[in-house]
Image (tube, rainbow, N blue to C red):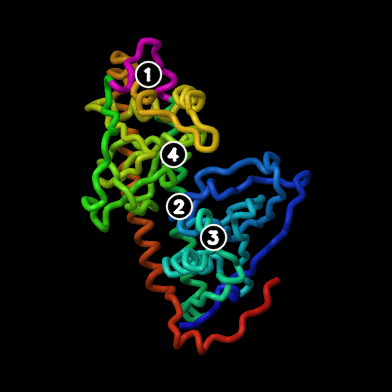
Amino acid sequence: MTVLRLDQLVQRVQDRAPLERAQGPFVGLEHIVPGQLRLAHVGEAGSQRSVPYRFQKGDLLFGALRPGLRKVVLAREAGVCSTELLVLRPRDDAGAGLALAALAHPATLLAAQRLATGTRMPRVRWSALRALKVRLPPPTERQRIDRLLLLLHARLEILHRQQALRAELLTAMTEAHRCSDAPPLADIADIIGGRPSPVSQIGSGDPIYGVADLPAEGLEIDRYASERPQTGRRRVRRGDILVSLLRPKLRKVGLCPLDGWVSAEVAVVRPRPGWLGAVLGTVRSRMTQEPWIQQATGARMPRFSLRQLRATPCLLDHGARATLRHSLDTIAQSILQAGDHGRCLRRAREEAIGRLIHPATERDSRCVGQADPIG
């Protein structure tokens, strides 16, 4: 094993892009899925008001603001990003797969949280993060291991794109057969609210899903949720539909992967038998979500209510649902099953990272040489 500082693996790039010359996709903190090392979607470079950073294909984007959200991603194309992200470029003798694994290692992310300053919006600075040390495989093994990590990463990206296409297909089929006399959601699904359970009932290993865990694209939710039990939460089951009541403009809807808990800002929609696909297609549709955006109240953090959700009409009536029931429910179940496959692949990647990359010990730290200067 070789001990290196992070700034011996990557160098920080602070290439500002004038707004009039900003090109390519825009990546903000909100576009990165917590803990999954991938983008949910991207914005447009020309829509920004502040001067962003430029990044190149193969650069790494690390979420410096609120590092507890575990937002790290490998850029697949050149673009611009928010200043809330650190643009880190792998050095010539370090592969992108190993650099991504080192930055996404649980020990690195935990250290980033501890090094962050600020109470409401904690931020970690590169001057603090760069000194963290990791133990890597011997140089003779790095190329092979780097390729393995990149192949695992690419397979997961393909799977996520397939999931997004399944969700789009389900929504498009529902919208194409919409009816004017369809029932409200309250007639075909249980909208769960009420008093939350006390924290004492929440097990230490139970996932707790918050707004940050819901996808803005697709329907797949990460198994490793970011919320922690500070106050009471509501019980949720695998296959429940989770809808963010907060900031509906973000259009966050997900399909619960495992039994767990949800925060108060997330509504639980539990379709009755045979209605899963129809309800999923309805709550993902822009036809449904636009009224939620208009009905939301509050200036800084607009939200809509459970009452409004219950009154939302389903896009399909009973006759149309009977015709499409098998197709819609098959797509919904395939999203759940592919999510299981994705979790297995993520677990394999995490195990590989855990075996191949280790946080440096105090003894290792005395052996590491001086890092190269930042370019």
Residue to which mark 2 is pinned: 34
Distance in Å between CA atoms under marks 1 and 3: 44 Å
Residue to which mark 1 is pinned: 313
**In this view, the mark in front (2 or 4):** 2
Three-letter amino acid code of the residue under disc 3 = Gly
- Asked if residue 303 lies left or right of residue 203, the reply is right
The answer to whether residue 255 is above or below residue 151 is above
Distance in Å between CA atoms under marks 2 and 3: 20 Å
Q: Measuring 32% from the left and 22% from the top, which residue is drawn there?
A: 185
The secondary structure type at the circle numbered 2 is loop
Q: Residues within 10 Å of mark 3 (few under 14, many from 20)?
A: few
Q: Residues within 10 Å of mark 2 (few under 14, many from 20)?
A: many
Q: Say whether disc 4 or disc 3 marks the residue closer to the N-terminus.
A: 3
**In this view, the mark in front (2 or 3):** 3
Inspect the magenta stretch and tell me whether residue 175 lies in it.
yes
Query: Could you say which is closer to the camera, residue 266 or residue 130?
Result: 266
**Residue 201 location in percent, x, y?**
21, 50
The answer to whether residue 113 shows anywhere in this view is: yes
Mark carried by residue 218: 4
Residue to which mark 3 is pinned: 118
